Image (tube, coloured by chain):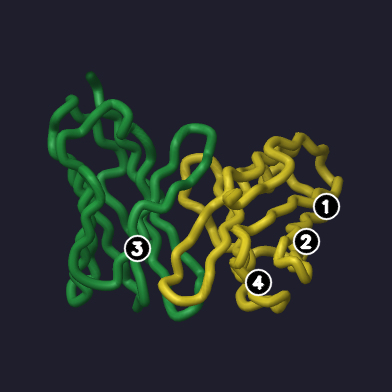
Amino acid sequence: KNEVEQSPQNLTAQEGEFITINCSYSVGISALHWLQQHPGGGIVSLFMLSSGKKKHGRLIATINIQEKHSSLHITASHPRDSAVYICAAQGGSEKLVFGKGTKLTVNP
Amino acid sequence: DAGVTQSPTHLIKTRGQHVTLRCSPISGHKSVSWYQQVLGQGPQFIFQYYEKEERGRGNFPDRFSARQFPNYSSELNVNALLLGDSALYLCASSSPGPWGYTFGSGTRLTVV
């Protein structure tokens, strides 16, 4: 079992839909990261969470430390949101343990 | 301010050859980490360096080595390349405190 599990692996939505991507982790963490990867490989850091909830534009990330679970929400999804979304757990060091990613496709 | 820069962007090597990948962190970032991402998988941790010292090493064979220079740039070296080393190699830099990361665009290595 991977230390970081994401679901779903693939997600297809229609433009405007509300999207939720889930992440569960089994290791102790100092922070949980959500990242976005577009075709071609470049990774963009979206959020770093240690508790509670963060919001940036149409993106919202939440974390429940007791349940070792985090969610990434996208409101009013748009085709440009199509990408792979990855969660990564950070322990005491700076090492990140990544999930396998969720491939999101938003159709117009 | 330039982001994390990696070179080269793409590389094709033959089995058994050696490769050197380079990474320049964001100005002021003293920590550099390397990750390997094979197709369809999440990135896997290879090395982390801070202030030129190795701080962590992932489960990779000794064919993989790295170093960090006084200007905090870093090199990842892979010897005796195997087909399975074909992957996207990502570099990330970070600064102390909130542990925010900035990733480079990666070097795509193909071993034939």
| Amino acid type of the residue tagged 1 in the rendering | Ala
Report crowding for label 1: few under 14, some 14 to 19, many 20 or more residues within 10 A (C-alpha): few
Give the CA distance from mark 1 to mark 4.
Answer: 23 Å
Of B7 and A98, the residue lying toward us: B7
Horizontal and vertical percent position of residue A42: 52, 42
> Chain B colour?
yellow
Callouts 1 and 3 on one subunit: no
Question: Marks 2 and 1: in contact by CB < 8 Å?
Answer: yes
- Where is A93 relative to B21, above or below? below
**What residue lies at 60% left-to-right and 52% top-to-bottom?**
B4
* Left-right relation of A51 to B18: left
- Mark 2 lies on residue: B63
- Where is A59 relative to B67, above or below? above
Q: Earlier in the sequence, mark 2 or mark 4?
A: 4
Give the CA distance from mark 1 to mark 3.
Answer: 37 Å
Q: Earlier in the sequence, mark 1 or mark 4?
A: 4
Chain where mark 4 sits: B
- Mark 4 lies on residue: B49
Report crowding for label 4: few under 14, some 14 to 19, many 20 or more residues within 10 A (C-alpha): many
Give the CA distance from mark 4 to mark 3.
Answer: 21 Å
- Mark 3 lies on residue: A48
- Where is A26 relative to B37, above or below? below
- Mark 1 lies on residue: B80
Chain where mark 2 sits: B
Horizontal and vertical percent position of residue B104: 58, 49
* Foreground: disc 2 or disc 4: 4
Of B68 and A8, the residue lying toward us: B68
Report crowding for label 3: few under 14, some 14 to 19, many 20 or more residues within 10 A (C-alpha): many
Q: Can you tell which quarter of the image residue A79 is in? A: top left
